[in-house]
């Protein structure tokens, strides 16, 4: 089968080193710097030795027979491993112990569409259906494969909550020790989920950005030797897991690109990899090549990327987060500048909503479609509504809105304004008095 390198728009093939293939990493051939294009052998590294730019995976993907590739994917398992030919994982990955995330529901949200004045197709990609109830199971599954290939024995991460649970569970299943780090003041649902799988959970007195800085120090210290930090030294591999959201959305739309997609932003990794996944599908001939727009969504109380987008800046000025959308509370997002590039290049935008709008949107999605989203889902639905009102998102087109997590983990967000319609004695009279009939 013919092969073709597929790289990000910022990499240069002029500097490409000869491709090195390893059975552990399937079609992945190198790490490539997103800033200067310098290439490195696949390894547990994440920053360019020449310019400190972030590294990402470069591939030799199977081109030349899109029909054959499509058939192979469709015959694969009902999880992310159906896309193994496009991921940095071994061909027999489906046989290794994993939580097997992915292939979550794409829900056609006609009731929500009516409420929002959408006349085109509106879909919710509902990633709350993953094994630990957030999209993080996708990225962790790929990082676990890399950790195994590099001989790490402990899995770790800095997390805003969901990632810690995903790492704890995946480590338990795959036979790693785990030790994960979170800000000390997260929601009870996130803390319990991160601890229940039996690994070590450490709360740090500080924000996520403090936790992340601490983890970077730990990597360079003998105390962190042999540790695979899924979103730090394994970040190039981890990020690729988010491409599967793009693949699934297109496959579930009948191998069709959506016109518009609304993605939550914390570090920005997910949004950049969804763009990478969509570009790959076009280059491989699996979907028709036509324009799509990517929109980023943040909470106002942590909106560094949205603020930069609106100000027309290329750099993202860090913020100190203060929002109920704690899963998105990264004040200094590593991929912020790349998100700005993608939103501008595709004709999308980055927008933010208040905490009150987040809660309203969680309830709107629950009441119209029966989907209970975590605060990050409230952010995307709330931003979608605002983008339509502002004329930035076209209500006549096909739009996909991501719900990346489960409302059961962020009950506190809606508990103050949600509860029983009445509490009654167990008698018909008492029920009638309650005024519900
Ligand atoms: C539920 C949820 N959605 C979205 C995100 C954003 O991810 P990223 O850091 O890739 O932007 C996170 C990150 O923690 C999350 O927990
Ligand atoms: Zn570089």
Image (spheres, rainbow, N blue to C red):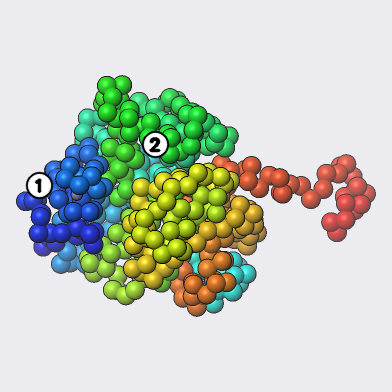
Which is in the foreground here, disc 2 or disc 1? 2
Secondary structure at numbered mark 2: helix
Q: Mark 1 CB in 8 Å range of ligand 2?
A: no
Q: Quadrant of residue 248?
A: bottom left
Q: Residue at x 46, y 64 (%)?
A: 310
State which quarter of the image contains the N terminus: bottom left
269 relative to 188, above or below: below
Q: Residue at x 22, y 67 (%)?
A: 283
Residue that label 1 marks: 20
The residue depicted at 73 percent of the width and 47 percent of the height is 419
Most distant residue in the left direction: 18
Camera-nearest residue between 279 and 266: 266
Q: CA distance from mark 2 to mark 1?
A: 31 Å
Residue 83 image position (x, y, % from top left): 28, 54
- How many numbered dots are placed on residues in this image? 2
* Residue 93 placement (x, y as % from top left): 26, 43
Residue bearing mark 2: 212
Mark found first going from the N terminus, 2 or 1: 1
Q: Is residue 42 left or right of residue 319?
A: left
Which mark identifies residue 368?
Answer: none
Position of 375 relative to 341 (above/below): above
Horizontally, residue 406 falls left or right of residue 25, namely right
| Residue appearing at x 38%, y 40% in the figure | 99
> Front-most of 100 and 58?
58
Image quadrant of residue 167?
A: top left
């Amino acid at each position: 089968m013919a092969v073709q390198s597929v790289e990000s728009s910022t990499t240069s093939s002029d500097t490409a080193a000869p491709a090195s293939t390893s059975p552990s990493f399937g079609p992945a051939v190198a790490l490539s710097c997103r800033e200067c294009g310098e290439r490195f052998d696949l390894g547990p590294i994440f920053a360019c030795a020449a310019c400190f730019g972030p590294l990402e995976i470069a591939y030799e993907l199977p081109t030349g027979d899109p029909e054959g590739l499509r058939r192979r994917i469709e015959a694969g398992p009902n999880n992310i491993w159906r896309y193994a030919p496009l991921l940095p994982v071994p061909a027999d990955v489906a046989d290794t112990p994993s939580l097997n995330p992915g292939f979550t529901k794409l829900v056609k949200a006609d009731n929500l569409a009516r409420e929002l004045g959408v006349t085109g197709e509106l879909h919710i990609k509902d990633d709350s259906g993953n094994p630990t109830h957030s999209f993080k199971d996708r990225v962790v599954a790929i990082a676990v494969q890399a950790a195994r290939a590099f001989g790490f024995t402990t899995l770790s991460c800095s997390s805003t909550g969901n990632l810690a649970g995903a790492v704890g569970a995946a480590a338990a299943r795959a036979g790693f020790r785990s030790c994960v780090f979170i800000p000390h003041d997260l929601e009870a649902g996130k803390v319990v989920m991160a601890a229940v799988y039996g690994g070590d959970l450490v709360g740090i007195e500080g924000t996520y950005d403090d936790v992340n800085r601490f983890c970077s120090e730990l990597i360079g210290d003998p105390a962190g030797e042999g540790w695979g930090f899924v979103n730090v030294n394994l970040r190039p591999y981890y990020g690729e897991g988010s491409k599967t959201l793009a693949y699934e959305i297109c496959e579930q739309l009948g191998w069709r690109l959506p016109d518009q997609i609304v993605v939550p932003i914390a570090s920005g990794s997910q949004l950049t990899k969804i763009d990478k996944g969509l570009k790959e599908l076009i280059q491989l001939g699996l979907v028709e090549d036509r324009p799509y727009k990517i929109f980023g969504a943040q909470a106002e109380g942590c909106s560094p990327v949205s603020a930069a987008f609106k100000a027309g800046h290329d750099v993202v000025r860090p913020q100190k987060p203060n929002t109920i959308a704690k899963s998105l509370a990264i004040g200094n997002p590593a991929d912020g500048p790349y998100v700005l590039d993608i939103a501008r290049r595709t004709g999308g935008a980055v927008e933010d909503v208040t905490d009150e709008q987040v809660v309203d949107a969680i309830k709107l999605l629950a009441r119209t479609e029966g989907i209970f989203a975590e605060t990050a889902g409230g952010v995307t639905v709330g931003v979608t509504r605002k983008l339509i009102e502002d004329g930035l998102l076209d209500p006549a087109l096909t739009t996909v809105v991501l719900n990346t997590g489960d409302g059961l983990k962020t009950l506190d967000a809606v508990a103050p304004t949600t509860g029983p319609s009445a509490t009654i004695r167990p008698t018909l009279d008492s029920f009638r008095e309650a005024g519900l009939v």
